[in-house]
């Protein structure tokens, strides 16, 4: 391999392993050249590569630093939802978004799908194709009711990396994380029960609460640290909450990672009030930090945490491979999962298991973290440049979506209508509330199309908003 | 093609098209030879082929007749379940069966999976792996929320064959028929509501009733004509029933096809009492009669029938492709389906759609009908020969399972325990009741392994029962 690329690769590893933290100064060019026995220009080329990837930044007369997010726009303030149990509405808005836009589009900011054209996915697709060719019979039977054992063994390894000791027998494979959430809700709560949720929070979870005839209790949520523990405690005092449903690690829509101490505090609160925690970890593996942040489940000593996840964000949603680590709710979860859709298809499970076993999953995640982080930085700059003053934005620590709060006078649904005329598709914020709050907010992915297209689309949106303003 | 095979093929078509009905005398050898301009021995060879397939039978000195089921063992009497709404139990029994038997087995009578090694499935498997090779990207996205449009167009064609005019937009694709049933139950009923079911009936539906916190009201059911309309009417008078859940066309476990007039009567009763009908048609396409029997849905003028089905019995369960034609409940069904598992994988849908479009599905069904019918006849003879006097048996009109009622003194669960020691796996009858009735009953498939193995296994079972008897 060309020498500077090799060096860049090694430096990148060091950064990703956390040997250098965001903001840290990197060794000087001279120093590094001496250390590695290469020329100054080789080091300079290597640094240039990392700079282009957005991993490091040059500061005039000071040298190179590990890139650090500079927050040039304010973050949204802690949310203030109505603090009482509510029926979830807004299904029509969700359906509208899911149904998609038939025509040609210019930029689709509305969905949350990972990059699926990455070369690091190729071995997975090849193995899936080969399984379909050579083990078609295995694909035709009902599989194992808990999911393929080989996959569950790999899930057990992944869980160790997130701080939990879980055996293969502790998992139940599901049709994506959506089924996982739905099954867990139905396993811990009954007709009319109250579920505490983040606000804003994932609409699929809100709608699952609705479909199970439960009520959502939206808890004030901070765009840096997640659900407010104080507000949660007040809510637990006041209402008969059955479970807390949270996405604490790379939240959807805001992208924050709840600090570890706060995850522990949340767990302890759940213990104190004897409620279950449904922890949605679907974005956990694509947090930008490496090693990945630990889960709430990692504190779980009495089995009250039902961990839900899937490969929909880390690989691709079409595989529909998700899972639950249901803790003490295992029997109920297995029953509800069986009636919900019986067994899951076997071949995608086999393909993913061998992809993980052979290191392909780690390699893919490493590549995606770099891509997503760089895309985030570009998006933040674009929003800063194009959106009206007073706009607030969340600073995701992983994944590929962020949350924008426009100044209150803007109506996101109207903006979305207007934008659609130009082929720019948006996800209005109200879906992320049980009751239609966040009418000035939007969730954006920052990976559809290419950076130039995204920037052009942001400019168009910015112009629209100025025009509306006058 | 060899001349006699060609002739046999044409005769088979005539029989399957219903030009000759069961019991009809076929033309004499001489007559047929003259008609087709072939030799007598060609006709004799052709008749021999059909005789081997179990489609026709020779009667001494009378000639050949279209095979007719001779009922040498009595059928089970109409069932007499407790006629009040009950909580469903028996999940442990179901789980036990689904978990399967780890060791080597001699014959597995317990499950209900179609023959999946048939050469007529090859084109489907080929198209699936080619899609995995060439359209991998399509497989990775979330698909259409209602299911692939191309598949739904084919479903619309199939529905026409079952007597319903349904457009592509009238279908919602699901992860198998299990999800279809579960979604429909949750769409028409709420906490504590009562669902009328056949007794015995499919355990997956019973368990879905349990999981949705509904109550099952088992209705007396006849092994020839299905659910008793009189008993149903009494039940509707007495209890606040929300929906009637039936598998009227090739019932699981009994295999009957409810007569068309009775299907109509059931529909009219549902209208009269304003309740919904959830019609499970999963075995409908492998009824032995051709063209296939019409559905209750074919009478549906006001959208109260939610038709559920899948390709799990007609093709293979591992594809997990099912569907709902939800009638007037469409919006609710779409919501519950979305929260239940979001979209279904696209590639299996594409593969099946093109298999149907190209005629492969019809070809496969034709081949399976012949195989299953022949297997049924062999099984009935085996049971007659091996099982104790007083055994009753259902005479399936399609599919690959039948229902055996042993004399009352037998305990099917104990027999199953004993049989397991010999590697013979059984499905005790109590799972097919909400409350553990049918303790002397068993459901058998008649297609595991080969006829000789099945017969040997039946002999072993027969010997066990005689030994128990003394
Ligand atoms: C937070 C969160 N949970 C769950 C899901 C559903 O995931 P899946 O596609 O695996 O069902 C999503 C997908 O958008 C999500 O963002
Ligand atoms: C009558 C009946 N309905 C539904 C199902 C579930 O079918 P699927 O495997 O398509 O979920 C079965 C499978 O055993 C069945 O026999």
Image (cartoon, coloured by chain):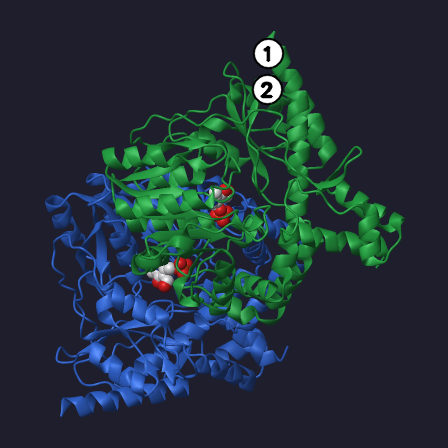
Chain colours: A green, B blue
Q: Is residue A108 left or right of residue A174?
A: right
- Relative to B288, residue A230 above or below: above
Judged from the image, the secondary structure of the residue bearing numbered disc 2 is helix
Q: Which chain contains the residue that carries disc 1?
A: A
Mark pair 2, 1: CA separation: 10 Å
Name the foreground residue: B316 vs A170. Answer: A170
Q: Position of residue A125 (x, y in %)?
A: 64, 59
Name the foreground residue: B255 vs A411. Answer: A411
Name the foreground residue: B415 vs B270. Answer: B415
**Mark 2 lies on residue:** A418
**Disc 1 Cβ-to-ligand 1 distance below 8 Å:** no
Q: Are the residues tagged 2 and 1 within 8 Å (C-beta)?
A: yes
Task: Determine the image quadrant of residue A423.
Answer: top right
Residue at 38 percent of width and 43 percent of height: A245
Q: Which chain contains the residue that carries disc 2?
A: A
Q: Position of residue A102 (x, y in %)?
A: 60, 33
Q: Residues within 10 Å of mark 1 (few under 14, many from 20)?
A: few
Residue at 35 percent of width and 40 percent of height: A209
Which part of the image, by quadrant, shows the N terminus of chain B?
Answer: bottom right
**Mark 1 lies on residue:** A468
Q: Are marks 2 and 1 on the same chain?
A: yes
Task: Determine the image quadrant of residue B356.
Answer: bottom right
* Residue B63 visible in the current orientation: no
Q: Position of residue B208 (x, y in %)?
A: 30, 54
Judged from the image, the secondary structure of the residue bearing numbered disc 1 is helix
Q: Is residue A221 left or right of residue A107?
A: left
């Amino acid at each position: 391999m060309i020498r500077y690329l090799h060096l860049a690769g090694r430096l990148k590893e060091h950064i990703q392993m956390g040997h250098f933290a965001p903001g840290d100064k990197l060794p000087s060019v001279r120093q590094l050249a001496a250390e590695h026995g290469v020329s100054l220009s080789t080091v300079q080329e290597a640094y240039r590569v990392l700079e282009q990837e957005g991993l490091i930044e040059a500061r005039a007369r000071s040298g190179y630093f590990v890139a650090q997010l500079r927050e040039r726009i304010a973050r949204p303030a802690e949310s203030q939802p109505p603090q009482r149990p509510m029926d979830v509405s807004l299904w029509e808005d969700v359906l509208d978004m899911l149904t998609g836009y038939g025509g040609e589009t210019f930029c689709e900011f509305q969905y949350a799908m990972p990059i699926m054209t990455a070369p690091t996915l190729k071995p997975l697709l090849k193995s899936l194709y080969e399984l379909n060719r050579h083990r078609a019979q295995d694909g035709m039977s009902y599989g194992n009711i808990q999911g393929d054992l080989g996959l569950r063994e790999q899930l057990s390894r992944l869980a160790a990396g997130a701080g939990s000791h879980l055996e293969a027998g502790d998992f139940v494979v599901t049709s994506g994380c959506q089924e996982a959430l739905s099954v867990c809700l139905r396993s811990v709560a009954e007709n009319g029960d109250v579920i505490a949720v983040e606000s804003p929070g994932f609409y699929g979870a809100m709608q699952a609460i609705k479909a199970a005839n439960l009520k959502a209790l939206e808890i004030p949520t901070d765009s840096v640290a997640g659900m407010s523990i104080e507000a949660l405690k007040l809510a637990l005092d006041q209402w008969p909450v059955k479970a807390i449903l949270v996405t604490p690690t790379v939240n959807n829509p805001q992208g924050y990672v709840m600090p570890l101490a706060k995850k522990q505090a949340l767990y302890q609160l759940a213990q104190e009030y004897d409620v279950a925690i449904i922890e949605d970890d679907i974005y956990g593996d694509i947090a930008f930090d490496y090693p990945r942040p630990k889960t709430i489940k990692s504190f779980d000593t009495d089995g009250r945490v039902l961990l839900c996840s899937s490969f929909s964000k880390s690989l691709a949603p079409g595989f529909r491979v998700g899972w639950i680590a249901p803790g003490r709710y295992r029997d109920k979860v297995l029953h509800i999962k069986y009636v919900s859709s019986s067994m899951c298809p076997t071949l995608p499970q086999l393909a993913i298991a061998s992809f993980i076993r052979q290191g392909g999953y780690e390699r893919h995640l490493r590549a995606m973290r770099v891509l997503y982080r760089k895309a985030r930085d570009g998006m933040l700059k674009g929003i800063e440049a194009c959106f009206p003053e007073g706009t607030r934005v969340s600073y995701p620590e992983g994944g590929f979506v962020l949350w924008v709060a426009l100044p209150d006078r803007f109506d996101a649904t109207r903006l979305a209508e207007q934008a659609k005329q130009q082929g720019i598709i948006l996800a209005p914020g109200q879906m992320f509330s049980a009751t239609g709050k966040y009418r000035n907010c939007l969730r954006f992915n920052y990976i559809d199309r290419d950076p130039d297209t995204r920037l052009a689309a942001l400019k168009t949106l910015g112009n629209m908003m100025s025009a509306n303003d006058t």
